[in-house]
Amino acid sequence: QAKRRTAPQIQARKGGEPIVSLTAYNAALAPLVDPLVDFILVGDSLGMVEHGMDSTLAVGLDLMIAHGRAVVRSTAEALIVVDLPFGAYEASPEDAFRSAARVMAETGCGAVKLEGGAHMAPTISFLVARGIPVMAHVGLTPQAVNALGGFRSQGHDEAAREKILGDAVAVADAGAFSVVIEGVVEPLAEEITRKVGIPTIGIGASSACDGQILVLNDMLGLTERVPKFVKRYGEIGKAVSEAVAVYAGEVRARQFPAQEHTYKARG
Ligand code: KIV
Ligand code: NA
């Protein structure tokens, strides 16, 4: 059995073959993704795509741990990264360590991710110094949706580009092993990727990044509305509707269950 990929192995891929990643949240889909990607993110996007919330703000640590455990349990090869949810790490490095240590210990994942740039750098070094690999996340940071004024692309003026570049440099200097860049204009993604020594993982951040990630449910066609940056590689939602419609019709027509699905008494 192949050994799991590690955070240092992902970090070492800077500038090399593109790093492939997706989110996954459960034991039904994670094992299908596992052999085909380098890392799986148990993202707090699960609040929206698996639990019907309209932002990620209400996702808590216990929910992240429950999903993280399901994904670790059902996979064997990919590095598993678990998001730290809103409220679990921002107030202090000590808070962040307690949350991250729970996530690592209770799920068995190999790294955590947190949102934020320069202001989170002291927290990132605090965690890294204590044995916790940290993936950072800059640009469009969904936990800050209220401060950003909505889910909108970032880096449209020079000041914004300077700020986000500074964030990426700060998290790299703090010891993050990789950084997600979300929803930023192409020239900024390109500049960040050129200037930081750790792999950049893009989502809505052009092909300039060292790797890519998408929300699994979005790319599989399991979600209704998707942002511009999502390409739909499957229409699994349609396949589910069609299968359920056939089942419903057969039950109503007493065609299912048929004889081959039916237990016969042996005596
Ligand atoms: O929660 C999530 O799915 C994420 C990715 C979009 C990077 O943070
Ligand atoms: Na997230």
Image (cartoon, helix red, strand yellow):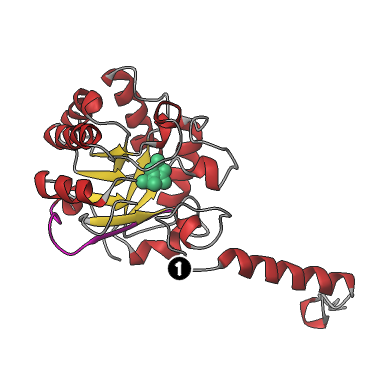
Frontmost residue, 5 versus 180: 180
Does residue 42 sit above or below 258 in this rendering? Answer: above
Q: Position of residue 70 (x, y in %)?
A: 48, 49
Q: Please name the residue that numbered disc 1 is placed on.
A: 233
Residue drawn at x 32%, y 34% as measured from the top left: 114
Q: Dividing the picture into quarters, in which one does residue 154 lie?
A: top left
Frontmost residue, 79 versus 210: 210
Q: Look at label 1 and name its amino acid.
A: Tyr
Does 187 sit left or right of 202 as displayed?
left
Residue drawn at x 56%, y 66% as measured from the top left: 236
Does 162 sit left or right of 74 as displayed?
left
Residue drawn at x 40%, y 50% as measured from the top left: 72
Q: Is residue 123 visible?
A: no
Q: Where is residue 211 in the image (x, y as percent from the top left)?
A: 25, 57
Q: Dividing the picture into quarters, in which one does residue 136 lie?
A: top left
Does 246 sit left or right of 122 as displayed?
right
Residue drawn at x 29%, y 39% as measured from the top left: 137
Q: What stretch is highlighted in magenta?
A: 12-23
- Please give the count of numbered marks on the rendered protein: 1
Q: Quadrant of ligand 2?
A: top left
Does residue 220 sit above or below 152 in this rendering? Answer: below
Asked whether residue 9 is drawn in magenta, I would say: no
Quadrant in which the N terminus appears: bottom left
Does 105 sit left or right of 207 as displayed?
right
Outermost residue on the bottom side: it is 260
Quadrant in which the C terminus appears: bottom right
